[in-house]
Image: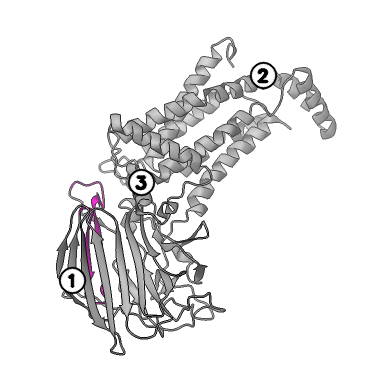
Amino acid sequence: MDQRRFLLALVLMFLLLFTYEQLFVRPYRRPPATPPETGQQPPVPGAEHPTAPPASPPAPGAAGLAAPVTEDTQTVTVDTDLVRATITTMGARLRSLELKKFNQTVATDSPLLDLVTKSQVLPLTVGLQNATSDAAVVYTPDRTAVEVHGSAEAEIVFTGKQADGRAIEKRYRFPGNSYLFEFDISAAGEHKGLGLILTPISELGASGGRSSGHELAVAFADGRVTELATDKLAKPTEVPASVWAGFSAQYFAALAVPLEGSSTALLAMSDDLPVARLEVPAPEGKAHFEVFFGPKERDVLIAAGHELDRALDFGWFWFIALPLLWGLRFLHRFIPNYGVNIILLTALVKLATAPLTRTSFRNMKAMQKLQPEMQRLRERYKDDQGALQKEVMELYKRNHVNPLSGCLPMLLQLPIFVGLYNALMHAIELRHAPFMLWINDLAAPDRLPIPGVPIPGGGLPVLVIVMGLSMLLQQWMTPQQGDPNQQRMMMIMPLVFTFISINFPSGLVLYWLVNNILTMGQQWAMLRSADGGAGK
């Protein structure tokens, strides 16, 4: 096997990994305005849904989850150390939930981030029997405002009447220092099950103030997280025995946890809006939940319990991503600039992988010395590929060169690279974290606005361009092997990678730029050392 072809395959694998991760593994796309047209209207989660998995999806029909909420509708406000919630008496549902530690944008006067999407289907609607819900029930609260701090708790009770005149009650119990609160339902009458409805969180929560539509419907059951893009919910998906379900974005999540009984999550469309419904058995008309609205910060999710930290997905190499994320936080204790922390972390990772890089470089230099002889063999056996491969292998054997020995160390670095990539992609610490100059949000794409010059995307991706140039220079410094066509292909790769990276978070681009610079420095030193040779 020609080593250059193997290297080309390796680079293509890197590009494929990034493209797949960006476009398919996390398909953060906006939901369509209406469900796709099909021969039949898709089932909706407001329909009757028994606790055991049904033989067929719930029957189509009006879900009854939507109810208009006007500005003059009475509300109850809840103020804790972490959130400011507004509950409307129309359905006793969340009308807003603002996070006090997070703003919508990096602007100094930016309002607090509200995780509730403004629509007629509001989170914490309760699905009742016969395809009805309590969305249109006008509740009476036992108080109009609550303020609670620290470890103290405060309870709000909403009472109302179902469509048949029977009583229904909702209880909210908020702690002062947690994003997790309790939610109880008590509905008089016979109910096979009760369903708690969650809706997609605000797009601002997903993309740091940019409307990129990163929401995913999620459910956790049997140790596995089911994730569905919100535009893929026209066909309902059931997840039996769910531990929790809801919606997850890049940095925030809205999740519900049933505290009793075996629940079934239904991820579907209702009233043209994606919904996640957690159905629990309720023979006595009672159900108990805990609800999480907050950041996907690992320590916060672990403290909330119920394995909510599984909503934070670091991919296959999570065991590498987590220590790297811990290292990023550790460095931030001493240097309060995450951009500088990324540079230092990259340098430490590069130092740890230096022996592997050196081994790869030595083998590439050894292969480079054989190129003139390999070129003569190609010309001599250009019409006999079998003989060419045999002679090439004999050449490797005579010179004690393994054509794969330069690639294997690179493959060993791949898990570290992917782990750091995932750590930076999901680190909420980088959201709205400034670095220097025009880079004021390491979680957002790099854009330098130029006054008077209209540029698509709002500015020039300077950091991405510099990163692409560094890749091009690094490729030029790498010992060249293989035929001219393969070499030209390798020189095109930096351009392709630059194009793919345009919308990557600037923190990730910063890492890749620093990694390239350090690699070039290492190559420069090795080229001038006795082990690296005198040059190209």
Residue 93 location, x and y as percent? 27, 71
Residue 102's spot in the image, x, y percent?
25, 50
- Of the residues shown, which amino acid type is indicated by label 2? Ala
Q: Residue at x 32, y 84 (%)?
A: 188
Nearer-the-camera pick, 127 or 230: 127
Tell me residue 418's x, y (percent): 51, 40
Q: Does 223 sit left or right of 159 as displayed? A: right
Tag 3: Cα neighbours inside 10 Å, few (<14), some, or many (≥20)? few
Q: Indicate the quadrant where residue 282 lies.
A: bottom left
Front residue of this view, candidates 506 and 278: 278
CB atoms at circles 2 and 1 under 8 Å apart?
no
Majority secondary structure of magenta residues: strand
Q: Residue 337 location in percent, x, y?
A: 29, 33
The residue type indicated by label 3 comes to Asp
Q: Give the structural element (helix, strand or loop) at label 2.
A: helix
- Circle 3 is placed at which residue position? 299
Q: Quadrant of residue 371?
A: top right
| Residue range (magenta) | 81-108
Residue at image mark 2: 366
Give the crowd class for mark 1: few <14, some 14-19, many >=20 residues within 10 Å.
Answer: many
Magenta highlight on residue 87: yes
Mark with earlier residue (2, 1): 1
Quarter of the image with the N terminus is top right
- Mark 1 or mark 3: which comes first in sequence? 1
Q: Which mark is residue 62?
A: none
Q: Residue 75: which numbered mark, if any?
A: 1
Secondary element at tag 1: strand
